[in-house]
Image (spheres, rainbow, N blue to C red):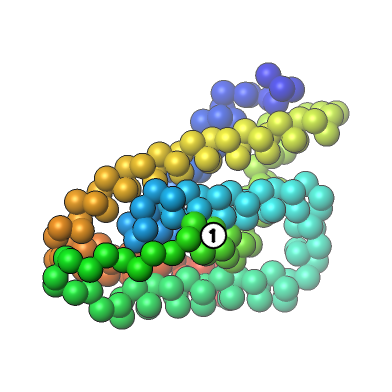
Amino acid sequence: MFDIQNYYSFLLAILVFQLIPGPGTIAILNATARNGIGAGMGAVTGTLLGDLTYMIAAVAGLAAVMKANPMLFHGLQWFGAAYLCWMGIRLLRARISSVPAAPEPEKTARVYLRQGLAVSLTNPKVILFFVAFFPLFLRPDSPPVTLAAMMVHVTLISFLYQAGLVLAGNVIARRLKALPFARKVATRLAGVALVGFGIRLAASNR
């Protein structure tokens, strides 16, 4: 279908990739917990824009340029690791009131869109994933429209999955607002997870 080889395996592979928790997932759930569905969808939009940017870059051959310039690639990796650790440390240091009366400060979806975009773009390994992933389902003589169809599939499935995360996360977040201790634990766990992702990314650069 769409001239994509092993079409159903292609769909399953995209879904499995989405199910692997990553920095983007945490950014989406964090935005939803803080300011609701609108904020979460803003983070989803930012994450998808970042992934789409890397997909287009992969198709255009930017991955080859990055491989030919390892200093640039490693520089982006270290920046991404530092950014994730910084976000995690902020969550670990955040003061959480034991009184569940004060709501989170209102922020626009645009703020979380920028955060989601930043998280996505500071993970340059995504571009190498797409470079390795797409050829598995292409023939040497596949037309350019096949690559376009593959990008549409990845974007659509990612959107459906991440939008589902926002809806489920919003329900959980609304219940946590009435439980200060649970909110504190959830915030600290998110911080630890972000720092962990940052350290893992940094370790892979060595």
What's the residue at 62%, 33% (across, down)?
Answer: 153
- In the image, taking residue 140 as reference, residue 184 lies left or right, namely left
Task: Using the image as rendered, state which of residue 177 and residue 78 is in the foreground.
Answer: 177
Q: Position of residue 154 (x, y in %)?
A: 60, 38
Q: Secondary structure at mark 1?
A: helix
* Vertical position of residue 8 compared to residue 75: above or below: above
Residue 92 visible in the snapshot: yes
Task: Using the image as rendered, state which of residue 15 and residue 114 is in the foreground.
Answer: 114
Indicate the amino acid at tag 1.
Arg
Residue 23 visible in the snapshot: no
- Badge 1: residue crowd in 10 Å (few <14, some 14–19, many ≥20): some
- Quarter of image, res 149: top right
- In the image, taking residue 205 as reference, residue 143 lies left or right, namely right
Look at mark 1 in the image and give the residue it sits on. 110
Q: Quadrant of the C terminus?
A: bottom right
- In the image, taking residue 64 as reference, residue 44 lies left or right, namely left
Q: Position of residue 18 (x, y in %)?
A: 48, 43
Q: Quadrant of the N terminus?
A: top right
Q: Position of residue 50 (x, y in %)?
A: 62, 55
What's the residue at 43%, 64% (across, down)?
Answer: 107
- In the image, taking residue 16 as reference, residue 74 lies left or right, namely right
* Vertical position of residue 124 compared to residue 95: above or below: above
What's the residue at 70%, 26% (across, down)?
Answer: 4
How many marks are shown on the rendered structure?
1
What's the residue at 19%, 51% (across, down)?
Answer: 175
Q: Position of residue 7 (x, y in %)?
A: 62, 24
* Vertical position of residue 146 compared to residue 183: above or below: above
